């Protein structure tokens, strides 16, 4: 569990360059990096505000993360490149069952990878945490994976701020790792909501009160 996973070729160099770029473009405030796992099975549970979320996670992850992303992003040049080159991207069909993607995620966790996933399932256009979906709780309950809450805020308008010659004040926070209770291994679908609530509240604790939504 302590030995880091081998990084893809060029990952560390690209990661350093990305960190330099983000620090040039924003006033970046980072806390909790010591909580990021070097290997899995682990799940980074992130809030989802804008497409640049993935850039901040990729810049600081200790292991190249496996990322779940909507299929629509696969053909978008910059986003598709980020997802594919800073780990392994698994593209899913939103709104419909995707057994192939699910099996790929389970396999990745069982092989000791670190998964990055947004439990909200879709982007928040307000920056306020939305209600979580049960998929993350299901994955954690079936694999026993370590859960690590990760949030970022203040980056929603980073590009428009740059146009006005301002650098956005961006906050990146990583919380303490935890696991679902042992009884979650036997949870049925109807039982998952309580574990989703736990996951979302761990994320909400890292956000300012006005961004916690229903988890305030």
Image (tube, helix red, strand yellow):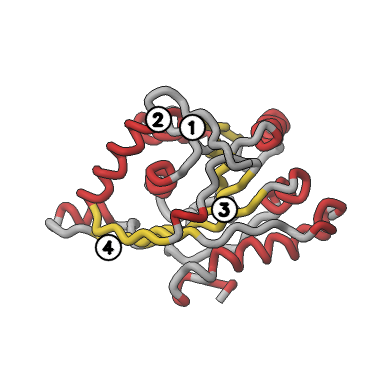
Separation of disc 1 and disc 4 at Cα?
Answer: 27 Å
Query: What residue does disc 4 label?
Result: 169
Identify the residue at horizontal 87%, vertical 52% (top origin).
Answer: 186
Residue 18, relative to residue 186: is it above or below? Answer: above
Which of the two residues, 45 or 76, is positioned nearer the viewer here?
A: 45
The residue at the point 71 percent across, 53 percent down is: 137
- Which residue position holds label 1? 87
Quadrant where the C terminus sits is bottom right
Tell me if I can see residue 62 in this picture.
Answer: yes
Which type of secondary structure does the marked residue at label 1 adopt?
Answer: loop
Please indicate, yes or no, whether residue 70 appears anywhere in the rendered image.
no
Q: Is residue 209 above or below residue 93?
A: below
Quarter of the image with the N terminus in it:
top right
Q: Which residue is mark 2?
A: 11
Verify CB contact (< 8 Å) between mark 2 and mark 4: no
Q: Which mark is residue 135?
A: none
SS at badge 2 = helix
* Residue 149 higher or lower than 211, as above or below: above
Mark 3 crowdedness (10 Å alpha carbons): few <14, some 14-19, many ≥20: many
Along the polypeptide, which appears first: circle 3 or circle 4? 3
Of labels 1 and 4, earlier in sequence is 1
Q: Earlier in the sequence, mark 2 or mark 4?
A: 2
Residue in the foreground of this view, choosing between 202 and 69? 202
Q: Position of residue 152 (x, y in %)?
A: 42, 58
**Residue mark closest to the camera, 2 vs 4:** 2
Q: Closest to the observer: 130 or 196?
A: 196
Residue located beneath label 3 in the image:
45
- State yes or no: discs 2 and 1 in contact (Cβ < 8 Å): yes
The CA distance from mark 2 to mark 3 is 21 Å
Residue 132 sits in which quadrant? bottom right
Query: Which residue is painted at 24% across and 43% down in the image?
Result: 21
Mark whose residue sits in front, 2 or 3: 2
């Amino acid at each position: 569990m302590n030995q880091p996973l081998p990084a893809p070729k060029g990952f560390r160099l690209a990661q350093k360059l990305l960190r330099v770029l983000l620090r040039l473009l924003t006033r970046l405030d980072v806390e909790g990096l010591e909580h990021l796992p070097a290997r899995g099975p682990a799940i980074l549970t992130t809030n989802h505000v804008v497409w640049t979320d993935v850039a901040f996670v990729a810049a600081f992850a200790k292991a190249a993360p496996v990322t779940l992303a909507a299929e629509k992003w696969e053909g978008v040049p910059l986003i598709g490149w980020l997802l594919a080159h800073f780990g392994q991207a698994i593209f899913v069909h939103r709104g419909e069952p995707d057994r192939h993607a699910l099996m790929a995620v389970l396999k990745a966790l069982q092989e000791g990878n670190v998964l990055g996933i947004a439990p909200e399932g879709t982007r928040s256009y307000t920056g306020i945490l939305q209600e979580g979906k049960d998929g993350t709780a299901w994955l954690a309950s079936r694999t026993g994976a370590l859960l690590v809450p990760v949030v970022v805020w203040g980056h929603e308008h980073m590009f428009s701020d740059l146009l006005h010659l301002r650098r956005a004040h961006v906050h990146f926070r990583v919380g303490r790792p935890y696991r679902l209770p042992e009884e979650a291994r036997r949870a049925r679908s109807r039982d998952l909501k309580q574990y989703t609530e736990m996951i979302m509240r761990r994320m909400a604790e890292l956000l300012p009160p006005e961004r916690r939504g229903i988890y305030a």
